[in-house]
Image: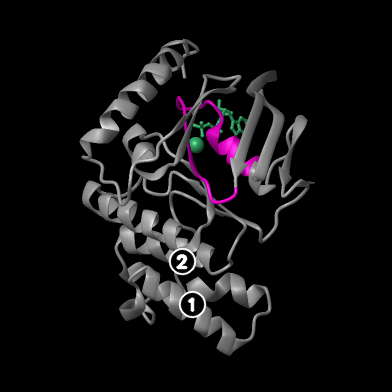
Amino acid sequence: MAKLEAKNIVKYFDHDGQPLKALGGINLTVDEGDFICLVGPSGCGKSTFLRIVAGLQKPEEGQILLDGRPIINTGPDRILVFQEGALFPWLKVQDNVEFGLKIAGIPDSERHEISKRYLEMMDLTKFANSYTYQLSTGMRQRVAIAGALVMDPEVLLMDEPFAALDAQTRDTLLVEMQMIWQKTKKTIIFVTHSVSEATVLGNKIAVFTHRPSTIKKIFSIENKRPRLSEDETLMKYQQEILAELRPEVKSKGDGE
Ligand SMILES: Nc1ncnc2c1ncn2[C@@H]1O[C@H](COP(=O)(O)OP(=O)(O)O)[C@@H](O)[C@H]1O
Ligand SMILES: [Mg+2]
C-alpha cells in the first residue's frame, strides 16, 4: 500500500533574480516499509524534495500525501535526520535521545524506557551519561538516529546522514541501518550521493535527473541482508544506476 505519494512536485527558487526551477514535477510512490534511496546529480533537488516531504518547504505545484492525506506542515510523523546530526552539546546522550519525547510531553519513566531500548539498539548504552562532544562523529550520528527513532515516525527521512563519516564507520552504520530497518519495519526515504551506499541500503533506488528534476528510473534490489559495500552481486546494479546518472551529471553545463 502507498504510504507516501508525491504527486507532480514542482519547486522554484530565486537565483539572482531569475526563477530557477529545481523540481520539475516529481512523482513518487513509497510503499509501507520501503527503504527507498534517492540518488541524483549534486544540486538536482534531492534535499529540497526531502524538505518538502518533511513539510519544511512548500512546493509551487503538486502535493505530498501521507496515508492518503495531504501534508501541509511539519509533524512528528515525519522526522528528518541530517548529515550533521542536530544534537544539543549541553545535554547528555540519553537526554538528547529523549528530547523529542520530552517536548511531546511523554512522562519521565516512559521516556526512559523508550530511550533505553533505542540506546541499546544503537550500541550506546555505555555512553548514556556522556556528553555528545565526548563522542566520535559516527557515535554522534547514532545518537541522532536514535533520537529520530524514539519518535516512532511513520516515515524516517535521512539526508546524506553518513556523508561526513570515515569509510569504516560508514560501513558499520550501513549494516546497523539495515538491521534497524528490518527490526522496526520503518518506511525510510534516504538521500545519498553514493550509488554504492544506495545499493547496500535500498530495496528501491530512485534516480533523479538534472534539474528541473524528475525521477528517471526506479530500481528494485531484493538481495538478502545485511548487504556489504563490497558485495559483488551489487555491482551489476551499481553499473546500471551509474549508466542512468552519468548523462545527468554531464548535461549540467551551468557552471555550478
Ligand atoms: N533556499 C534556497 N534558495 C535558493 N536556491 C536554493 C535553495 N535551496 C536550494 N536551492 C537550489 O536548488 C537546487 C537544488 O538544491 P538541493 O535540493 O540542495 O540539491 P541536492 O540536495 O540534490 O544537492 C540547487 O541549485 C540549489 O542551489
Ligand atoms: Mg542535498
Q: Which residue is drawn at 56% across and 30% down?
A: 45
Q: For this view, does 30 lie left or right of residue 143? A: right
Mark 1 surroundings within 10 Å by alpha-carbon count, few (fewer than 14), some (14 through 19), many (20 or more): many
In space, the residues marked 1 and 2 are separated at their CA atoms by 8 Å
**Image x and y of residue 115, in percent:** 49, 77
In this view, the residue in front, 115 or 15, is 115
In this view, the residue in front, 1 or 19, is 1
Circles 1 and 2: CB atoms closer than 8 Å: yes
**Image x and y of residue 95, in percent:** 49, 77
Q: Give the residue type at disc 2.
A: Ala
Which residue bears the numbered disc 2?
146
User: Is the residue at mark 1 in contact range of ligand 2, meaning its CB lies under 8 Å from it?
Assistant: no
133 versus 162 height, above or below: below
Sequence-first tag of 1 and 2: 1
Q: Which mark is residue 148?
A: none
46 versus 19 height, above or below: below
Which residue bears the numbered disc 1?
115
